[in-house]
Amino acid sequence: MKKLTLTTALLAATGLAGMAQADKLDDIIASGTLRCAVVLDFPPMGMRDANNAPEGFDVDYCNDLAKALGVTAEIVETPFPERIPALMSGRVDVGVASTSDTLERAKTVGFSIPYFAFEMAVTANDATGIKSYDDMKGHTVGAVAGTYEAIALEQQVTAWGEGEFRPYQTQADVFLALSQGQLDATVSTSTVAMANVKTGNFAGISVVGKAPFDTDYVALFTNRDEYGLINYLNLFVNQQIRTGRYAELYEKWVGGELPALTVPNAYR
Amino acid sequence: MFDTALSAADLVFLAKGAGMTILVTAISVAIGTLLGILFGVIRVQLGATLSLPLTFFLDIFRSVPLLIQLVLANAFMGMVLRLQISGFTVACGVLSLYTAAYCAEIVRGGIDAVPATTRRAARSLGMSWMQDMRYIVAPLATRIALPSWIGLALGVMKDSALVYVVQVTELLKSTQILITRLQEPLFLLLICGAFYFLISFPLARFGGYLEKRWSHD
Amino acid sequence: MFGYTFQWNQALARLPKMLDGALVTMEVAMLSMLIGIALAILLTLLRLSGARPLRAIATGWVEIARNTPALFQIYMAHFGVASFGIHFSPFVSLLIGITFNNAGYLAENFRGALKAIPETQTRAGRSLGMSQLQAFRYIILPQMLRISFLPMTNQMVWAVLMTSLGVTVGMNADLYGVTQDLNALTFRTFELFAIAGVLFYAITKIITLGARVIAARLFRY
């Protein structure tokens, strides 16, 4: 009897271990569905159309990835702060969520090579008279909690020693607060800033200039130990550029000069 | 203010969110109440000392913000145990235990309020423990506990606004999604608030009425 | 057995920051309670007053506070009122939201407590030459606060838990906000929020125990 219990326990343990070690790439192909974490209040990367259905650069990118894998795509909306918890809790397979590939984060998740690059821009409420990045000194500024630009801007406000920094949960809340006059200015990716100003939803705000932050390279991400999938993602990003699909999507959603995804004088 | 870009499709979208709020609430209150009755009875039967571990466990749900409970349960199930469960399940699970923790207190209060002499009288008439519980304690305790229970159920409905954190699109989250697109925060928020109010207010009044009526005789 | 490696030291290294956040959380909760009690007394007086419009305002406040989500109230205090051009900082918005909620619930508790105080007491006070307000101030109020002491303690615990909703209006100095920021930086979700949970638990226990000590001193006889 005792032996039987032990065997059962062992079997169960190996079964569990086996499950944990299953290759995610295989799982996705077998399940027939690719679940992507996408931020849907981040136009033009992710947003909702008039029927409240997801659309945008990241949405198309996820669909392309699903097509390449021969599966159907499922878009899971994840606000910025919830991207990683959604991945870690197995709610999504891959993040196509304009995520900056910082070293701190790479300790927890696995990043692909960059699939997009953002320049940072300053958007200000017209009434404040802010005309440049440095004009923001002493003002109330904000950004989306947990993003690259939020972390950099908060450090800047601390360095200036005056003014106030406020992180909001979503990009929409930031622009809402900005147009309401609760914020004087924000730093966001220039594509997002342009897209938001262009919608005409927000009166009295304009993009006033660049923010002197490093280029924000964003990458696809998945679990850190899923080398097979990460390898696939790298090749996929490469193919998107090679086949001209990257340029096509860029023209469709953003327009203008295509940002380079390679870092000068570096191997990768 | 009433010049709005809100379309019929958006109203359907909001209604779906409201449906989700009601669904999550209904499931959680149903499971939570059953568990709460069980835990409440166990606590009364075992006495304060023996039920200490249970009391401590339930107390956690009343002492840690619901947001953190949801984030932690989500992270634990997915990250640590690597179980594939939906946000909806996590939301219902956490809210059920959350409901149970409060419900156990209400049940305990209800049972304690039944005079010991009444119960002893029942037992001396030859009733078994089960019969005593079923015919004496349950009806009396329910009268005392029902108003609080209605308050609890409504509280759970209002607190279900936090399940957005595990990717469940309920009413408040649907409202925020529409605010993103339509940029009419005040108007949309008022619709959302009115919905909660219209469900909660009459039921709360009913609870108050019961309390008043039953406390007089 | 777990498919996850805990990295507690990475999270624990951030404990000082989280403790700072815990102080802010307690500050907000404390302030919202003090103002909330004052407002709730005012609301109770308004509800007792004969003037119909005043009663309506007080009842409206209490019912809205009790019948809509706290998250909704806080969101409203920031983004809602801004539609009228009124701007509050995240700290103030959160404080207003929680205080509004506290005042509503406490006023309802006070109303229940008043029922337990015989009306003859007010009349006795009046016949001793006290004004209506004096009778309330010196006879009714102390008893009302005493009867409501336990509900007030519960409301204080609620206030602490409600501070976690501040992140939705741009607050990041409180315990939940700090934790979320650290999570964005390091992505150690489970460890960080587990520590935050323990801290919240400790805060609520300090409050309930503190209240017990105060009650023992105040209500000795």
Image (tube, grey):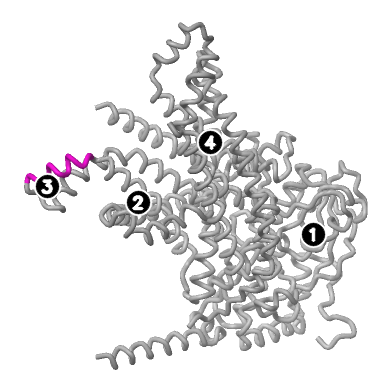
Q: Which residue is at the front of the view, A237 or B77?
A: B77
Which residue is depicted at the point 61% across and 84% down?
A225
The region drawn magenta spans B115-125
Q: Secondary structure at mark 1?
A: strand
Q: Is residue A143 magenta?
A: no
Rendered location of residue A104, percent (x, y): 73, 74
- Residue B50 relative to residue C167: left or right: left
Q: Which mark is residue A188?
A: 1
* Residue B9 shows up from this direction: no
- Circle 3 crowding by C-alpha within 10 Å: few under 14, some 14–19, many from 20: some
Q: Nearer the viewer, mark 2 or mark 1?
A: 2
Rendered location of residue B59, percent (x, y): 44, 55
Q: Nearer the viewer, mark 3 or mark 2?
A: 3
Q: Secondary structure at mark 2?
A: helix
* Host chain of mark 3: B
- Residue that badge 2 annotates: B104
- Residue that badge 3 annotates: B123
